[in-house]
Image: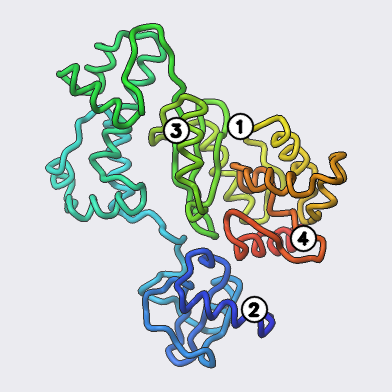
Amino acid sequence: MFTEKLKQQYYQALLAKDKNYDGVFYVGVTTTGVFCRPTCPARKPKYEHCEFFKTAQEALLASFRPCQRCKPLSHPDHASDLIQKLVAAVEANPEERWKDYHVAELGCDPSTARRQFQKRFGMTFVAYARARRMGIAMKEIRKGDPVIQAQLAAGYESGSGFRDAFSKIMGAAPASRGEHYLILHATWIDSPLGPMLAIADEEKLFLLEFVERRGLEREIERLRKRMKAAIVPGMTKPLHAIEQELKKYFEGKLKKFETPFFLLGSDFQKKVWRALLKIPYGTTRSYAAQADSMGFPRATRAVANANGANQLALVIPCHRIINSNGALGGYGGGLARKEWLLQHEKIFC
């Protein structure tokens, strides 16, 4: 199934617990009869005791049972029951000023909740709930309601406390009635290749990236500043849409994304990204061929740089661009993911 070179590559990824390979392959250990994901914390087997598989189903059919430590049948970094329970509680009562004792009242350990939310969202549970509450306040301000009304809706009796909390989360203090802000909502979407972060307003998708992408934090900050926006946890119609379309894409049931999106870039970058949309599902094109098709035969490097600046992974299929010699080239989500995506599309083409 795999070449010897690829097996050696996968084994090195296994030894390094490389997150970029989560979902790309699974390893069966002949001495224990279990199969694991590449990031399994268990002691690593010798190379001669490893069998590699593209899917968990293939490993199961080869009589391996799932590892109890890395749980290869669940998505990488799948939300725990605790996280799902607390997120649902916030959505049921988003205006509540959540504290640790509220978490305890729900039968959850506050310190465990703090750690799990920090790992998954980059903020504690209390900070997550506060950001959600502030998002509601921002929506009130955008509708033209007075700041004091938004302040009370967010559960703050002190005006200074509201402004301090607002500035910490939103990046700017609330203004007087009539001034409008752009609110962007962010959500975490699990996928077979690892978690993805999606950001959208009420109408369009602005960003979709693998969480492991290098420089993702800078992308998000640049988006926030250029759009003069606040980014808060939450769901919108485009986020629901892209979540469902991603599910169908990874099942091989969707070849073209229909979720409306917003392109944030220069005129040249936008032209490059629109050209990417014309590359058929299941096919590839070289960087040079892409530049030539756009009428810029001498701008291969500039086109490649624009590809790399794409902030809508999969939706704008920059993974379909490879080197002229057939090598994969670069990919912000990692070459292992790029190879997996190209193979996936060939199967369902």
Query: Distance from label 2 to label 3 (Cα)?
Result: 39 Å
Badge 4 marks a residue whose secondary structure is: loop
Label 4: how many residues lie within 10 Å, few (<14), some (14-19) or many (20+)?
some
Report which residue position mark 1 lands on.
Answer: 264
- Comparing labels 4 and 2, the label whose residue is closer to the camera: 4
Label tally: 4
**Which residue was labeled with disc 3?**
185
Distance Cα–Cα, label 1 vs label 2: 37 Å
Q: Earlier in the sequence, mark 3 or mark 1?
A: 3
Tell me what residue is drawn at x 64 percent, y 51 percent. 249
Please tell me the numbered disc located at residue 6. Answer: 2
Q: Which residue is mark 4?
A: 323
* Element marked by disc 1: loop
- Which residue occupies the foreground of this view, 226 or 337? 226
User: Hey, what amino acid is under mark 3?
Assistant: His
Looking at the image, which is closer to me, 342 or 18? Answer: 18
